[in-house]
Image (cartoon, grey):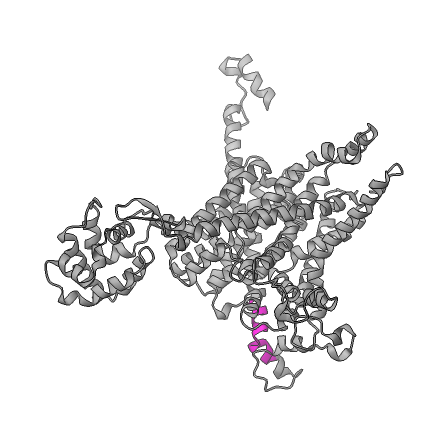
């Protein structure tokens, strides 16, 4: 959108004003996330920049809260950096345990959501699929229904069948919450999928599973992986269901942050937040690369 | 296929009917194949459908069932329940009902269930707990006529409202919890009346939730529209870079964003400290305006959280609008304002509908942000549901509030489906 030569003075002013407005809005979006990164290196237990930090005094910065992230909950008997210390951190540090739980729950629920979701998306994208709209709306609804309703419902239900305060219970709930994202991304990849490729494979004598793994799978893989990443992020980010269903043993990172904010607010959560921002940048990059790959595969060239 | 179907009527003789390789008429064969294809497609979806029904639909249905059917009273006071079933609510129940209640309470006392009954009744009749516990403690010393004995013990037993509540709570389907959820109750004659003024909270919370959601949507729209327009009109290389500013918050964990807003907005946080350094607000942290743990904090953080959900649908619609329309309008003499108003804006309405509905739906059910940043006056209906589940243990009321919230959400979802269509939902 270049300024046309025939633009009136008012339009010229608006042109630049518009850009400033947009820059301000984008700043509003991104600044809160970036601001926590320097804050997490604060030496003092404050949530704001100390005068030393503003003077760029090296003494005002430290890795204190990152060490606290590792040490909090450990026995403190071992020297930092030794093998015994590392084992202690892995086993006892509360954030390390939360991290372990988060990854375990997110990975297992992602596998369930992606497997079931992809198979269903294959069916949903077939032109013969009966009641397509209704079923699709139902499968997307976990994303729409307020999380508190889902969480409370799951809590009552899982309590009845004895799965409350278990990993199984949380994993099932998180898989359910991730499914809409898998369905949406995979069906999006499958629209514009050339069904003749399947017919060609079949007419050449390929059995169904060969057709799936050799023809369909490579083409929908980008959509599948980005759906899986969405499901992973959903579970990794989810706290309400965990609040109701999980016990202290199944605490995840967001749940730990929740009590960090509620009970003992310390800059350690800023350190954790910084680590999570790095993880989300990694996921965002992966998604973007996948999107480009998908466009290339489907022959859609960016304008 | 259509040509083959068209051939059939022109050659009526049976010997000429088109047949498939195995001898069945082609029409029937075709129907067979179609049926099989439909079945195949359905079978692929079936596992997920069952999963969703078991893990998602069933739990919610079970919760909603709790809002009309709470079995505690029915099970703990079986004789009273049976006697009250035919009571016409005209005058106090007869001696037989009182006798049945005393019998039930005797049994309940042995099972140590009186406290549970009292707590359950207390949800619909304040003060019922002590009335029931008091009666439960004396069941051994009560003698016929029981109505007089109970009334001597506690005059509250003479209140028809208490009996109406026992009757409602013992019914297989009761509307009492839904009435409670909209700040209504039953009076002495069983008519629906509003609860006393100082107890009316739910309607107010519902209104606040809707009002806040509308406010958030109205704030997201003017913030999201220019950004979406900029992203859609810039060359792809630049817009992809700027898109990171939109997508990174979208991908960052919610708790991280909330932490960030606490760091920024609290009284000695980044924003107010900088403003203080510039002389705009007081240096004394106690005198600074409160920006977090109230409605302001919730509002700012929720707009930040939901803004990408507004920008992304807008962007995907604007991306499809050919710039030549606007150019044509300009070359025909329209001013830039007219071009925008008459040509560009109408084409973006589907995106506005999608974004606004999505943001509204998401904010109506929001829980975490108000719970952490809302303090006392920033809480929404979701937080109330959680409160009734966790602290007051009034699960039926929580279920009823949840039922109303769910109904509102489903109506909006239906609207979204109708106007926008779920097929157009895209991620990233």
- Direction right: furthest residue: A5
Q: Which residue is drawn at 59% across and 60% down?
A: A237
Identity of the residue furthest to the left in this view: B144
Magenta span: chief secondary structure: helix
Depth order, front residue of A204/B401:
B401
Q: Residue A97 colored magenta?
A: yes
> For the N terminus of chain B, which image quadrant?
top right
Q: Give the range drawn in magenta.
A: A87-101
- Given residues B297 and B234, the one toward you in this image is B297
Judge by depth and name the residue closer to the eye, B226 or B409.
B226
Q: Where is residue B90 in the image (x, y as percent from the top left)?
A: 20, 44
How far across and down, in percent of the image, does residue A258 sit?
55, 66
A127 to B137, vertically: above or below: above
> x, y percentage for residue A77?
59, 87
Specify whether B128 is left or right of A192. Answer: left
How many dots with numbers?
A: 0
Is B129 positioned to the left or the right of B293 in the image? Answer: left
Residue A71, x across and y down, in percent: 61, 79
- Is A207 located above or below residue B141 in the figure? above
Residue B58 visible to an observer of this rendering: no
Q: In this view, does A266 lie above or below B40?
A: below
Can see residue B59? yes
Which residue is rendered at x = 79% and y = 35% of the image?
B336
- Note whether B36 is above or below A28 in the view shown: above
Quarter of the image where one finds residue A53:
bottom right
The verdict on residue A189 being magenta is no
């Amino acid at each position: 959108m270049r300024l046309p030569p025939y633009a009136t003075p008012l339009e010229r002013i608006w042109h630049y004003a518009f850009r400033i407005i947009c820059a301000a809005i984008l700043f509003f979006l991104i600044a809160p996330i970036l601001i926590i990164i320097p804050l997490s290196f604060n030496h003092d237990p404050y949530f704001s920049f100390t005068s030393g930090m503003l003077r760029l005094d090296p003494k005002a910065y430290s890795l204190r809260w990152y060490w606290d992230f590792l040490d909090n909950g450990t026995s403190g008997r071992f020297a930092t950096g030794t093998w015994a210390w590392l084992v202690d951190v892995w086993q006892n540090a509360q954030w390390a345990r939360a991290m372990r739980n988060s990854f375990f729950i997110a990975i297992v629920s992602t596998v369930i959501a992606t497997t079931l979701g992809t198979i269903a998306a294959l069916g949903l994208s077939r032109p013969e699929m009966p009641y397509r709209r209704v079923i699709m709306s139902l499968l997307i609804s976990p994303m729409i229904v307020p999380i508190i309703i889902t969480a409370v419902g799951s809590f009552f239900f899982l309590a009845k069948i004895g799965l409350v305060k278990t990993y199984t219970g949380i994993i099932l709930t998180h898989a359910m919450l991730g499914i809409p994202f898998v369905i949406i991304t995979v069906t999006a990849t499958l629209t514009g999928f050339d069904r003749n490729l399947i017919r060609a494979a079949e007419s050449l004598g390929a059995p169904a599973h060969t057709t799936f793994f050799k023809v369909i799978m490579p083409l929908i893989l980008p959509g599948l992986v980005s759906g899986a990443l969405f499901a992973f992020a959903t579970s990794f980010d989810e706290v309400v269901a965990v609040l109701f269903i999980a016990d202290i043993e199944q605490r995840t990172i967001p749940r730990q942050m929740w009590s960090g904010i509620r009970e003992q607010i310390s800059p350690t959560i800023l350190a954790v937040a910084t680590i999570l921002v790095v993880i989300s940048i990694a996921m965002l990059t992966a998604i973007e690369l996948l999107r480009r790959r998908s466009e290339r595969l489907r022959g859609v060239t960016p304008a | 296929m259509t040509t083959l179907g068209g051939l059939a009527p022109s050659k009526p003789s049976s010997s000429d009917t088109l047949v498939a390789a195995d001898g069945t008429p082609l029409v029937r064969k075709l129907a067979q194949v179609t049926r099989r294809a439909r079945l195949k497609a359905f079978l692929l979806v079936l596992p997920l459908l069952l999963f969703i029904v078991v893990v998602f639909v069933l739990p919610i249905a079970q919760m909603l069932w709790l809002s009309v059917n709470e079995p505690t009273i029915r099970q703990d006071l079986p004789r009273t329940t049976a006697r009250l079933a035919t009571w016409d609510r005209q005058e106090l129940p007869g001696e037989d009902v009182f006798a049945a209640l005393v019998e039930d309470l005797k049994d309940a006392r042995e099972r140590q269930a009186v406290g549970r009954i009292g707590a359950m009744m207390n949800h619909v009749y304040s003060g019922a707990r002590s009335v029931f516990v008091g009666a439960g403690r004396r069941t051994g010393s009560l003698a016929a006529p029981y109505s007089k004995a109970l009334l001597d013990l506690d005059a509250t037993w003479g209140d028809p409202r208490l009996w109406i509540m026992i009757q409602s709570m013992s019914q297989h389907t009761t509307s009492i919890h839904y009435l409670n959820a909209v700040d209504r109750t039953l009076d002495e004659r069983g008519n629906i009346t509003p609860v006393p003024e100082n107890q009316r909270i739910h309607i107010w919370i519902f209104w606040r939730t809707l009002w806040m959601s509308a406010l958030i949507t109205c704030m997201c729209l003017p913030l999201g529209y220019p950004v979406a327009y900029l992203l859609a009109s810039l060359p792809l290389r630049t817009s992809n870079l700027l898109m990171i500013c939109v997508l990174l918050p979208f991908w960052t964990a919610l708790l991280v964003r909330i932490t960030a807003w606490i760091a920024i907005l609290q009284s000695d946080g980044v924003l107010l400290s900088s403003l203080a350094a510039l002389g705009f607000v007081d240096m004394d942290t106690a005198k600074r305006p409160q920006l977090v743990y109230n409605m302001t904090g919730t509002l700012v953080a929720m707009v930040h959280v939901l803004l990408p959900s507004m920008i992304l649908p807008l962007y995907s619609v604007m991306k499809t609008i050919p710039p030549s329309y606007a150019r044509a309008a300009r070359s025909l003499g329209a001013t830039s304002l007219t071009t925008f108003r008459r040509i560009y804006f109408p084409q973006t309405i589907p995106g506005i509908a999608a974004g606004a509905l999505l943001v509204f739906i998401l904010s109506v059910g929001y829980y975490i942000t108000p719970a952490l940043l809302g303090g006392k006056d920033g809480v929404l209906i979701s937080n109330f549901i959680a409160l009734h589940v966790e602290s007051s243990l009034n699960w039926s009321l929580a279920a009823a509030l949840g039922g109303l919230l769910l109904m509102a959400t489903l109506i909006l979802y239906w609207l979204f489906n109708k106007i926008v269509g779920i097929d157009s939902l895209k991620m990233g």
